[in-house]
Image (cartoon, rainbow, N blue to C red):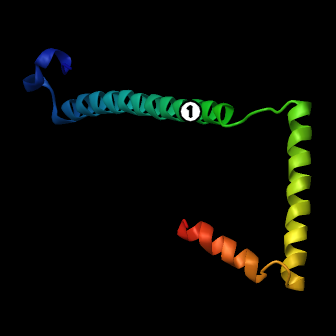
Amino acid sequence: MELRNNQNADLSPASRYADIRHVTETRNAEIRETVELVHKTVKDRREQAESIGKKADSIELSDAAKDVVDDTTADRKERLDELREAARDGSLFDRDRLVRAAERLLGE
């Protein structure tokens, strides 16, 4: 950027200072605009990525699939209740069951 056609020798120090200040302020404004644009672009890209991630991470189940899930959940809950009750009354950990479990764990 030129300062009054590069004829600084003829300018007073106040005029040179004013020219330099004007050029600096103009350049700083341009830099600020660029930085703001970069920040906005980064923010927009981040929002797009989050939006894509949310869409990719979700599924919709049909009514039939929901029924299967509900039935399976109910069956699982019922089985867990049975196991808890057996553990409370002592019938869950009988000797035969422990031997079978140990054999399965040891691979015999």
Look at 54% across and 65% down and name the residue there.
Answer: 107
Residue 35, position as x, y percentages in the image = 41, 33
Circle 1 packing at 10 Å, graded few (<14), some (14-19), many (20+), is few
Q: Which x, y percent locates residue 19?
A: 25, 28
Residue 2, placed above or below residue 73 = above
The vertical placement of 78 against 60, above or below, is: below
Q: Toward the viewer: 100 or 10?
A: 100
Extreme-top residue of the structure: 5
**Left or right: 35 as drawn, with respect to 80:** left
How many discs appear?
Answer: 1
- 29 or 8: nearer the viewer: 29
Q: Which residue corresponds to the image point at 79% horizontal and 82% vertical from the top-left? A: 94
Query: Which quarter shows the N terminus?
Result: top left
On the image, which quarter does residue 44 sit in? Answer: top right
Residue at point 40%, 28% (across, down): 34
- At a point 91% along the width and 46% down the height, the residue shown is 71
In the image, 105: left or right of 4? right
Which quadrant of the figure contains the C terminus? bottom right
Camera-side residue of 89 and 43? 89
Outermost residue toward the left in this view: 9
Three-letter residue code for mark 1: Ala
The location of residue 31, given as percent across then percent down, is 36, 31
Q: Nearer the viewer, residue 24 or 100?
A: 100
Residue 80 appears in which quarter of the rendering? bottom right
Give the secondary structure at mark 1: helix
State the residue position of label 1: 49
